[in-house]
Image (tube, rainbow, N blue to C red):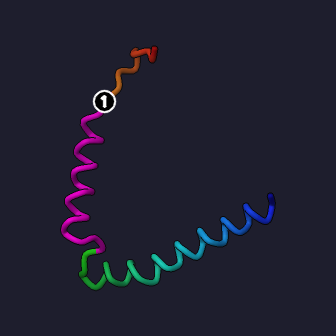
Amino acid sequence: MVFLVISMLVVTVLAVAVVGVVAVPAHRGGRDVLTAKGEAIAEDARRRASGVVRRPDARMP
């Protein structure tokens, strides 16, 4: 089990490193990280998420 957790952490660190090496310099260079379709999907998700408001006194059945 410990081996599984350590290997998952290693994979996560490698993924973050790849994003850091590829996406950050591209973004600083003025290129968009997402395509136009990806930007539209992200904006739609933000819009839908901001529309979801839960009342604090609402109880789940």
Instruction: Report x, y in % for residue 44.
Output: 22, 50
Residue at 25% from the left image edge and 42% from the top image edge: 48
Q: Main secondary structure of the magenta part?
A: helix
| Magenta-highlighted residues | 33-53
> Is residue 52 shown above or below 15?
above
Numbered label tally: 1
Instruction: Report x, y in % for residue 45.
Output: 27, 49
Relative horizontal placement of residue 33, taking residue 58 as reference (left or right): left
Relative horizontal placement of residue 46, taking residue 10 as reference (left or right): left
Q: Quadrant of residue 36?
A: bottom left
Residue at 58% from the left image edge and 76% from the top image edge: 14
Q: Quadrant of residue 9?
A: bottom right
Few, some or many residues within 10 Å of mark 1 (<14, 14–19, 20+)? few
Location of mark 1 (residue): 53
> Is residue 28 shown above or below 46?
below
- Please state, as top left, top right, bottom left or bottom right, where the N terminus lies in the image: bottom right
Magenta-span inclusion, residue 55: no
> Is residue 59 shown above or below 50?
above
Furthest-right residue in view?
Answer: 2
Relative horizontal placement of residue 58, taking residue 39 as reference (left or right): right
Instruction: Report x, y in % for residue 47.
Output: 22, 45
Q: Quadrant of residue 31?
A: bottom left
Residue at 73% from the left image edge and 61% from the top image edge: 5
Of helix, strand and loop, which one carries label 1?
A: loop
Amino acid on which the number 1 mark rests in the picture: Val
Residue at 27% from the left image edge and 48% from the top image edge: 46
